[in-house]
Image (cartoon, helix red, strand yellow):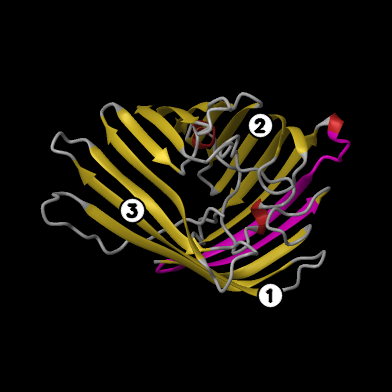
Amino acid sequence: MKKILLASTALVGFAGAAAAEISLSGYAEIGIDGGNLGYETQFHNDWQVNFNFSSTMDSGVEFGGKVQIEESNSPAAINGAVTSDDEAFWVSGAFGKVTLGETDGAFDWALSEIYTGTGISDDHSTHAGAYWFTGLDATYDNQIMRYEYSFGDFAAALSAEMDDTGVGDTNYALGGKWSGTVSGLDVGVGVGYQDNGVNSVWGLSGSAGFSNGFSVALGYADLDGTSDAVGNGVPSDSWWGVGVAYTPATMSALTVGVNYGEYQATSASGMADPSGWGIVANYDLGGGAVAMASYGSSDNGGAGNGHGDQTWSLGLGMSF
């Protein structure tokens, strides 16, 4: 789940390639997690390494990319097999930025999730009501080209994912977002649309940060009867969610977040509406180490992490 790598090291320059750099960053976690419905309490560890590349052409146009190496979490993985993920490369200049690879489509790029913080099993953000605005990405081979352009506080993007067999329609998306300050509040809004020729989805997101340490995030998605992307497999017409977070001014290392999300299952499915809530607490220990605790509760569906409908985890995340 979307771990955040907070530290970068080992900048390397290459002879004959002025301004060329490779940055190496890593993340590891250790702890314990549990659930129900047959999932036993057990120890947990995971890791990943990111390679980021960048350089500049003589014309001033920048280019680069990233590759992530991580332990495979697949149940079929043997002896901690490793895999590459999130491979994508980009070119950026006054014309905007073009990215190609395993990257977010414009729908996901424009919309902000309602979740704050992280847990070793991300229980707070994988319950039956959780949604990450993944839209219709990975309809085909997950090779996505996205063009984005920023102007002031606004940014807009267009993306496409093609069916290499030539049978399916191109999966395209549009998105836009804005962030700024309104009456002392840090505000962000996003809107996105995506269509793969079979289904179309659109979504809205909004967030506001207050000076007293509270923040709130809202999200809505019209899903056109598609199955959600977190493992519930319930065809749904729509989703909505809300998240609230708090970082005390007197204890800035601590962040606590709660959220609730709910799908509207299609009438044709004959299934109940999946929903759930989650809570997470993170405490920054300094040096890239964060103590993490998370819990998720699901109704009408299990958690997307496969640990049942009541799941929890406790541990330490370490960024390098």
The residue that label 3 is drawn on is 52
Whether residue 231 is visible, yes or no, is: yes
Q: Quadrant of the N terminus?
A: bottom right
Q: Amino acid at mark 3?
A: Asn
Q: Which callout, 3 or 1, points at the residue further toward the start of the chain?
A: 1
Quadrant of the rendered structure where residue 134 is?
top right
Left or right of residue 287: residue 213: right
The residue that label 1 is drawn on is 42
Disc 3 from disc 1: Cα separation: 33 Å
Height in image: 260 above or below 247? Answer: above
Secondary structure beneath disc 1? strand
Q: Which callout, 2 or 1, points at the residue further toward the start of the chain?
A: 1
Q: Quadrant of the C terminus?
A: bottom left
Q: Position of residue 95 (x, y in %)?
A: 28, 26
Q: Which callout, 2 or 3, points at the residue further toward the start of the chain?
A: 3
Q: In this view of the protein, which residue sits in the foreground, 93 or 144?
A: 144
The residue that label 2 is drawn on is 221
Disc 2 from disc 3: Cα separation: 32 Å
Q: Amino acid at mark 1?
A: Gln
Q: Position of residue 9 (x, y in %)?
A: 30, 63
Q: In this view of the protein, which residue sits in the foreground, 275 or 168?
A: 168
Disc 2 from disc 1: Cα separation: 35 Å
* Residue under the point 29% across and 51% down: 53
Disc 2 crowd rating (10 Å Cα; few below 14, some 14-19, many 20+) is: many
Check if residue 71 falls in the magenta segment.
Answer: no
* Residue under the point 79% across and 57% down: 309
Quadrant of the rendered structure where residue 227 is?
top right
Secondary structure beneath disc 2? strand
